[in-house]
Amino acid sequence: MKLYHEFRARVATRHVKIKTQITVLNMLKRLDKIRFRGPKRDEFLDLAESPNASDSECNDDVPVKQRSSIKDTEELRDPAGSGTLTMSSAIQDYQKCETDRLNEVKGHLEIALLEKHFLQEELRKLREETNVETLKQDLEKEKSKRVDLEQKMNEILRSRLEDSPPPPTKPQVTAVNGTGDKQKEMLCSRLWKWLYERFGVYIEDFRFQPEENTVETEEPLSAKRLTENMRRLKRGSKPVTNFMRNLSALSSWHSVYTSAIAFIIYMNAAWHGWVIPMFLFLAILRLSLNYLIAKGWRIQWSIVPEVSEPMEPPKEDLTVSEKFQLVLDVAQKAQNLFGKMADVLEKIKNLFMWVQPEITQKLYIGLWVAFIASCFLPYKLMGFMIGIYAGIKFFIIDFIFKSCPKLRDKYDTPYIIWTNLPTDPQLKERNNATLNRRIQPVVARGSQAAGMPCGIGREEESGRACNTKRGPFHEVFNLSEIERPLPVCENGWRCCLINRDRKMPTDYIRNGVLYVTENYLCFESSSSRATSSKKNKVIKLLDITDIQKYKVLSVLPGSGMGISITMPSTLKPLVFGAMIHRDEAFDAIYTQYTKIMSSTIATTVTNPET
């Protein structure tokens, strides 16, 4: 009985083991299907390499089966063994296998969840990148547009077929006429279709569409580009300037024979009414000559001999000063060119805006006379009169006026009108001058009403009126009241004082204003706060031993913007730099210096004892 019960218990445990193994294997197969369903299964670790897997997960199912079979054979060989020991060992083996399988299932589940998470993230990214919804909407819009266009095409074809005149109907319709009508309709439809295919494209071009506002991109500022554009402008305007030079040479009779032949031909054409055909023929002749020149012919004809300008080779290795000088030259040319163009445009504007009423009045009367003459006189007679007057004016009157400038200033009406037309800066200067003239009498009356004593001269009055930003001039520099700035520098010259004897940066360079009086050279520092400050500089003109123009930075082009003054009290000369009006200030200082030195020399010669 005991053997029977042990054998039955072993069979039951074996059946349980087999069932659990079958269920676990089914679960593993399903998990493997889930695991290897995604496209990125190679990115994950294998079960043998995963850290979450146990040591038993690395083993296969085959050795497990071998172990179980070995145990069974041992039990069969030894049926009389102790049942309790085998029962306990079987239960322990079963528990170990179950825990290993559970750990393996747990690892598979974690891997499956990770794959699911990564796949969801990739799907979200793909949706964001592709914008499937917007593409679907665009596709639907294109489909709707295509359907609308097809409907419009069909409607147009139907309307044209309906508008076509129907064939004449006869009271007796036979089968032959019916077939003929169908053939005509087919021919008409084919004809309309052919016409639409050939000319439908041109009809579509006449559709009105809104204009697209395109913004042109501006190029950045470049010195090389600026110089190249100026050269291009010069080359492009060369034909126009040559044409104007030839016209001026014809008018001034530079070549007597050429001007005489041109005058005779023009007057003959104007007398017979061939002025317009003559100009058209000259234009055709010019184009023909240009064609021959473009083909390689060497044809050069000019009344005035052309001066060939030397072509400057492109310089690549330029120093900083040469590049700066090149930019300055180009900027100066551009400034002068724009100034001339602005003068012409402003004069034309002021002529039509009645800025100078007496000048615009002449134009107004001339336009009325031309209008009345055009209403009553025939056009042939008017063309004859205008042509004869233009020839005489161009070849004879202009030559006389150019030769005699006084006659031109008195009787050349177009020249007088053009020269007397003001530009906007000239108008501004005139308005300021008239305003100052109006203010001066009012100021004089006010000073008389204030009871100014009559003994005070103009010099004392101007000396009292001269003030700086810090206060009265004589108080700022601790001078007598007689000392005042010269009329040339009433407001002073902005500059910076460079004292190279000082080593401190605050004392080395000072910004301020320079004044010149009859006996002193005064520098007011802009950093001085009090009325009289030690930062201000007063130099006696008699103490100066040398005055020269000075260039502070040798890298910059030009003669510089500074003045150096040498004195016995300083080791190195003082420099007044960064002066915009350097030449004007130098002339004023040097003139006053020579005047004082000459007066002192004269006094020493006359009074040698002193």
Image (cartoon, rainbow, N blue to C red):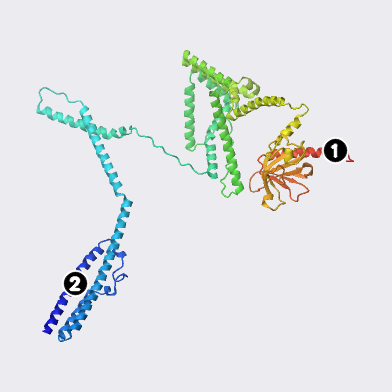
Is residue 444 placed above or below 550 in the rendered structure? above
Where residue 29 sits: x, y (%)?
21, 67
On the question of residue 40 being in view, the answer is no
Q: Which residue is mark 1?
A: 603
**Which of the labelled discs sits on residue 54, or is there none?**
none
Where residue 500 sits: x, y (%)?
71, 50
Give the residue at x 78% y 45%: 545
Q: Is residue 570 left or right of residue 187?
A: right
Give the residue at x 53% y 22%: 266
Is residue 232 placed above or below 102 in the rendered structure? above
User: Spatial distance from mark 1 to mark 2, Cα to Cα?
Assistant: 138 Å
On the question of residue 279 being in view, the answer is yes
Labels 1 and 2 touching (C-beta < 8 A): no
Where residue 513 sits: x, y (%)?
68, 41
The residue under label 1 is which amino acid type?
Answer: Thr
220 vs 569, nearest the viewer: 569
Q: Which residue is mark 2?
A: 20
Q: Is residue 243 left or right of residue 480?
A: left
Q: Secondary structure at mark 2?
A: helix
253 vs 456, nearest the viewer: 456
Quadrant of image for the C terminus = top right
- Of discs 1 and 2, which sits in the foreground? 2
Quadrant of image for the N terminus = bottom left
In this view, the residue farthest toward the right is: 609
In this view, the residue farthest toward the top is: 376
Is residue 251 placed above or below 91 in the rendered structure? above
Q: Is residue 384 left or right of residue 523?
A: left
Give the residue at x 30% y 62%: 114
Where residue 581 sits: x, y (%)?
67, 39
